[in-house]
Amino acid sequence: MFNIVLLEPRMPGNVGTIGRLAYATDSVLHLIKPYGFGEITQKEVKRAGLDYWEHLEVCEYENIQEFWKKNPFGLHHYLATTKTKQAYFEPTYKSGDYFYFGREDAGLPETLLNQSIQTCINIPMVNEARSLNIANSVSVIIYDAIRQNITEFRKL
């Protein structure tokens, strides 16, 4: 239904948890290297993803350029960041949209954010928290996209 893009993920448990979410929502998980851990077959990834991992549609890329060759960057590529005022619930999402999430320790690079300021989205927070856990952030945004497309989602 949607595309979840993890740029250079660092924690295998988060990748596994997000993979499980991707499976549950019929989303594709795109993983862009380098990872902050070994291979995607690492036991921590599998443990967090439980027995869903083998059924998940997951694509791996050596770098962002390889990803863009196969998935050209455009207006339906949303960039999750704390560096924007546009809340995640403001845009209108469509099935097939891409949602990018950056490294747990650094977020998405400024150069990427500057490519498409109009598609940067954030999750509002009311205090001084720097950010939410990446798996929680993916859940919040993907489920709002599903809410906006609930009729299509129910047909799956």
Image (cartoon, grey):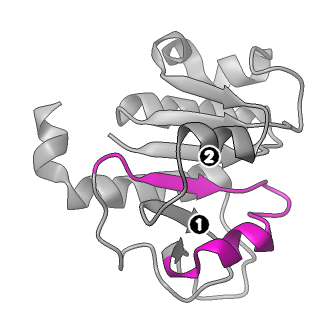
| Frontmost residue, 72 versus 147 | 72
Element at label 2: helix
**Where in the figure is residue 120, as x and y percent of width and height?**
55, 75
- 150 sits left or right of 97 in the view: left
Q: Which residues are magenta?
A: 95-118
Residue 107 image-quadrant placement: bottom right
Decide: is 38 above or below 27. above
Tell whether position 113 is magenta.
yes
The amino acid at mark 1 is Ala
**Where in the figure is residue 149, as x and y percent of width and height?**
20, 54
Number of other residues with Cα within 10 Å of mark 1, as a class: few under 14, some 14 to 19, many 20 or more: many
Number of other residues with Cα within 10 Å of mark 2, as a class: few under 14, some 14 to 19, many 20 or more: few
The amino acid at mark 2 is Trp
Decide: is 47 above or below 117. above
| Frontmost residue, 123 versus 110 | 110
Residue bearing the label numbered 2: 68
| Frontmost residue, 148 versus 125 | 148
| Frontmost residue, 24 versus 101 | 101
Q: Nearer the viewer, mark 1 or mark 2?
A: 2
**Where in the figure is residue 83, as x and y percent of width and height?**
68, 82
Residue bearing the label numbered 1: 80
Q: Quadrant of the C terminus?
A: top left
- 146 sits left or right of 64 in the view: left
